[in-house]
Image (cartoon, rainbow, N blue to C red):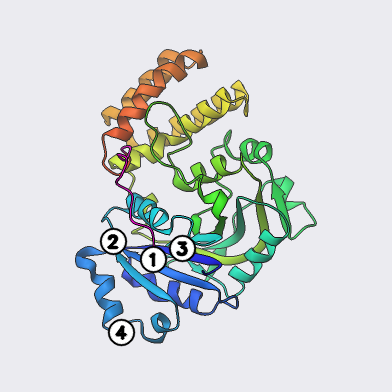
């Protein structure tokens, strides 16, 4: 059994070579790689079989499976295939790159305590792999003298939810423990949950079981480019992502993790973002605006009114609808 299973929900062939190169150069070698091919006509599978990635693919313990042809479901199906088959798991996105000491440093962080996930800093890049800028961390982390900084639930909720600030980052820069990965977010059936943004939902759920550990080294890059999901939000999935912070804030308030004033701050930011993104022509977003206008002064009433809207929005798209029992992917051999 490998120590780490690396799961790549693959769609973008143009960046996959650099992603594989980052893995091939790891100084910690006890990992296997599973690529779930979501590309049109299984193009990535054919390229790998034809030797397009050459020694990069051959140097890795690599398995390729067919994806469900949906980005969100591809993440979820990979987690289901992994099914706890290694002590740690890493969702490596197909357009990001990790540096050679990534796994060695993350394993050292996990050995320093019991954590749901380790999270390293990443450089932001534009198209290529050259660092352009970093991403700010809250004072509780940035001012710590430690290389490995534990972050508990109270700290994470207070620094993330009121300002709708995902300072943690993307799955590529996390290594989850098997215990922590059980918190991977899935669409709720009958109440609010932290499902919405997958990485945000994961950390907010997982940290309630065990702290995160933040690694203050930059150990990878977060690539920004025109085909990125966050640049194409005028879709059903885009609506889910656009209003997910309202769900997150209401649930965090209901659980006593943030204040009423914090919820108002989060909703105000979210309304402004949705106005900039959608204007006043999208019926779902307009329904969101109407609920805020009608119940914004009474969070109890807003929670009750918000729940059916949120569950209906999730159920309206196959990628975010609750999955019936028995439809998970078979576990990896």
Q: Earlier in the sequence, mark 1 or mark 2?
A: 2
Range of the magenta residues?
321-333
Q: Quadrant of the C terminus?
A: bottom left
Secondary structure category for the residue under label 4: loop
Left or right of 148 in this view: 106: left
Task: Assign the magenta stretch its main secondary structure.
Answer: loop
Residue 182 falls inside the magenta stretch:
no
Question: Which numbered dot is residue 92?
Answer: 3
Is there any visible trace of residue 267 in the rendered image? yes
Q: Residues within 10 Å of mark 3 (few under 14, many from 20)?
A: many
Q: Tell me if label 4 and label 3 are in contact, CB under 8 Å.
A: no
Q: Earlier in the sequence, mark 4 or mark 1?
A: 4
The residue that disc 4 covers is 51
Taking the spot 70% from the left edge, 61% from the top edge, the residue there is: 111
Taking the spot 39% from the left edge, 61% from the top edge, the residue there is: 225
Secondary structure category for the residue under label 1: loop
The residue that disc 2 covers is 38
Q: Earlier in the sequence, mark 4 or mark 2?
A: 2
Kindly report the distance in space between the C-alpha atoms of the residues bearing marks 3 and 2.
Answer: 14 Å
């Amino acid at each position: 059994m490998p120590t780490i299973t690396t799961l790549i929900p693959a769609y973008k062939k143009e960046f996959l070579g650099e992603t594989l190169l980052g893995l091939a150069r790891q100084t910690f070698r006890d990992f296997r790689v599973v690529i779930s091919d979501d590309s049109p006509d299984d193009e990535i599978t054919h390229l790998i079989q034809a030797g397009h990635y050459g020694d990069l693919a051959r140097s890795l313990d690599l398995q390729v499976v067919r994806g469900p042809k949906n980005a969100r479901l591809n993440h979820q199906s990979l987690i289901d295939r992994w099914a706890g088959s290694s002590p740690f798991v890493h969702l490596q996105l197909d357009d990001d790159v990790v540096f050679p000491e990534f796994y060695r440093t993350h394993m050292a962080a996990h050995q320093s305590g019991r954590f749901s996930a380790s999270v390293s800093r990443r450089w932001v890049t534009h198209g290529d792999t050259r660092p352009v800028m970093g991403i700010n961390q809250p004072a509780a982390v940035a001012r710590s003298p430690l290389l490995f900084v534990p972050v508990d639930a109270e700290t994470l909720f207070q620094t993330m939810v009121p300002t709708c600030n995902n300072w943690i980052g993307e799955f590529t820069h996390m290594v989850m423990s098997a215990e922590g990965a059980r918190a991977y977010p899935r669409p709720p059936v009958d109440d609010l949950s932290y499902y919405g943004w997958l990485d945000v939902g994961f950390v907010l759920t997982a940290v309630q079981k065990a702290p995160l550990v933040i690694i203050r080294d930059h150990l990878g890059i977060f690539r920004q480019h025109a085909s990125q999901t966050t640049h194409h939000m005028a879709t059903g999935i885009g609506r889910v992502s656009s209003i997910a912070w309202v769900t997150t804030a209401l649930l965090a308030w209901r659980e006593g993790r943030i204040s009423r004033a914090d919820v108002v701050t989060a909703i105000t930011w979210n309304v402004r973002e949705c106005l900039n993104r959608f204007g006043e022509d999208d019926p779902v977003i307009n329904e969101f605006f109407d609920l805020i206008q009608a119940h914004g002064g009474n969070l109890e009433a807003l929670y009750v009114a918000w729940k059916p809207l949120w569950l209906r929005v999730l159920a309206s798209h196959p990628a975010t609808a609750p999955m019936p029992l028995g439809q998970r992917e078979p576990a990896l051999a």
